[in-house]
Image (cartoon, rainbow, N blue to C red):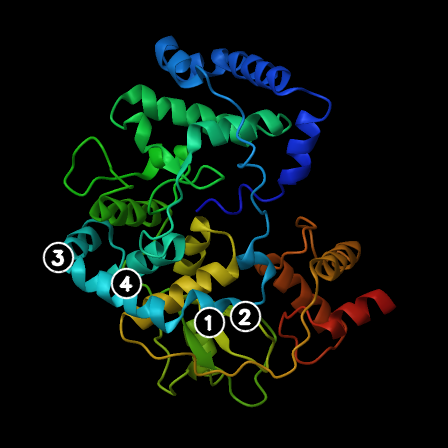
């Protein structure tokens, strides 16, 4: 839920910069002065002065919070390597156990929000391994520290104030506000603003306990996906098999159109005829192939990483009794660095194919731009895959 929004903190360097040349007493005073400067914003958000003072009293910067790693496996590790860890047999078994343990509650939650139980449980598994890795940091202190260190960004300041709003409502005890080094809380790993917007209790009580009541966490995950646009009875997508000589004229189309081109499910059965889809080839045309529905992009609202969203989807399928991937990963595949991917984005931008952020992370906008370049340069197959050959052709031109 929160991995993307905290990306880009050069953590240890920032903390060293903040404390460089300062004694601890001076740093603590500067930190307190910064917190007091936030009072007008907190007041505007409806926080009472007593709540603000109680939260800030004696608060000191947390040197451990910014020292956390900012490497994000779901963005930096190739899907081929990320998937076996995210959808391990052990995690599948734990997911199936959780599905059985909370089957009755999940049935009610699924009916209420229109999200399948297996998707809800898979999100729980992806976020905290079914509650095993929630984090024990004081997120008020953590967010205050990050807000102080990153005064150039509103994000952490706003989340710190959102945490104060939670406290001011009086339904969540101060001791409950624990989570990750970046302020993500409980089983769903909601940041404070997400908790205020999406947290839902299973029994309708005022306090959604996403720390110690799994049924509340499951309801909250389902509420997030529902309000993000999840369409009931629409799958996330499916693994598919492309026919020999498949026409890569477009990566987008209706499932009916893909079926007409000879695309079938990975087990050889016919595609369902309803809905639109996007063809996703994470290792190019020679690797596994997927058709992604509109619901897949809802999963990316939880975490804007294809490795994360696809792993969540495949984990849900396995929890539901589905089989492992049928497609094979290419042997000896060469993976590009983030710098190489940034170069591809920059070169595509120069040629008018790409207008997104130059960040070295390939999402659908990058894949569409690569596909357009491949088609224009008559590179076959035009599979939208950022390969070393695409990099070579772009830089050679």
Q: CA distance from mark 1 to mark 2?
A: 6 Å
Give the spatial CA distance, label 1 vs label 3. 30 Å
User: Would you name the residue on which mark 4 appears?
Assistant: 118
Distance Cα–Cα, label 2 vs label 4: 23 Å
Report if residue 397 is visible in the image: no
Residue at the disc numbered 2:
81
Asked whether, in this view, residue 365 is left or right of residue 126, the answer is right
Residue occupied by mark 1: 84
Q: Are marks 1 and 3 in contact (CB under 8 Å)?
A: no
Which numbered disc, 1 or 3, marks the residue that appears first in the sequence?
1
Q: Residue 12: which quarter of the image? A: top right
Residue at 69%, 72% (x, y): give it. Answer: 387
Marks 1,2: beta carbons within 8 A: yes
Nearer the observer, 281 or 170: 170
Quadrant (top left/top right/bottom left/bottom right) for the C terminus: bottom right
Q: Is residue 55 above or below residue 180?
A: above
Pair 1/3: label in front:
1
- Could you say which disc has been placed on residue 104 in the image? 3
> Residue drawn 31% across and 76% down?
322
Q: Are marks 4 and 1 in contact (CB under 8 Å)?
A: no
Query: Which of the 4 image quarters holds residue 340?
Result: bottom right
């Amino acid at each position: 839920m929160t991995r993307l929004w905290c990306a880009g903190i050069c953590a240890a360097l920032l903390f060293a910069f903040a404390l460089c040349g300062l004694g601890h007493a001076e740093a603590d005073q500067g930190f307190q002065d910064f917190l007091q400067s936030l009072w007008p914003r907190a007041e505007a958000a409806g926080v009472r002065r007593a709540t603000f003072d109680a939260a800030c009293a004696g608060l000191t910067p947390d040197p451990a919070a910014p020292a956390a790693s900012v490497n994000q496996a779901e963005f930096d590790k190739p899907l081929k390597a990320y998937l076996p860890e995210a959808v391990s047999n052990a995690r599948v078994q734990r997911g199936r156990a959780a599905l059985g343990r909370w089957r009755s509650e999940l049935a009610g939650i699924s009916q209420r929000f229109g999200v399948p139980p297996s998707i809800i449980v898979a999100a729980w598994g992806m976020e905290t391994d079914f509650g095993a890795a929630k984090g024990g940091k004081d997120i008020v202190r953590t967010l205050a520290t990050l807000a102080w260190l990153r005064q150039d960004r509103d994000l952490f300041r706003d989340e710190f104030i959102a945490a104060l709003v939670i406290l001011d409502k009086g339904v969540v005890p101060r001791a409950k506000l624990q989570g990750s080094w970046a302020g993500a809380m409980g089983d769903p790993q909601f940041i404070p603003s997400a908790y205020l917007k999406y947290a839902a209790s299973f029994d309708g009580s005022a306090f959604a306990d996403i720390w110690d009541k799994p049924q509340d966490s499951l309801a909250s995950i389902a509420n997030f996906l529902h309000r993000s646009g999840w369409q009931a009875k629409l799958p996330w997508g499916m693994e598919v098999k492309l026919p020999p000589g498949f026409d890569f004229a477009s990566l987008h189309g209706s499932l009916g159109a893909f079926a007409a081109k000879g695309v079938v499910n990975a087990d050889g059965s016919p595609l369902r005829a309803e809905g639109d889809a996007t063809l996703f080839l994470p290792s190019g045309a020679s690797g596994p192939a997927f058709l992604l529905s509109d619901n897949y992009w809802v999963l990316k609202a939880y975490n804007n990483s294809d490795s994360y969203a696809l792993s969540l989807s495949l984990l849900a399928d396995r929890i539901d009794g589905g089989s492992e991937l049928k497609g094979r990963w290419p042997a000896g595949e060469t993976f590009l660095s983030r710098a190489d991917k940034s170069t591809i984005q920059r070169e595509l931008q120069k040629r008018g194919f790409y207008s997104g952020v130059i960040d070295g992370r390939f999402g659908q906008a990058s894949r569409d731009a690569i596909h357009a370049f491949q088609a224009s340069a008559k590179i076959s197959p035009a599979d939208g895959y950022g390969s070393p050959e695409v990099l070579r052709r772009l830089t050679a031109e």
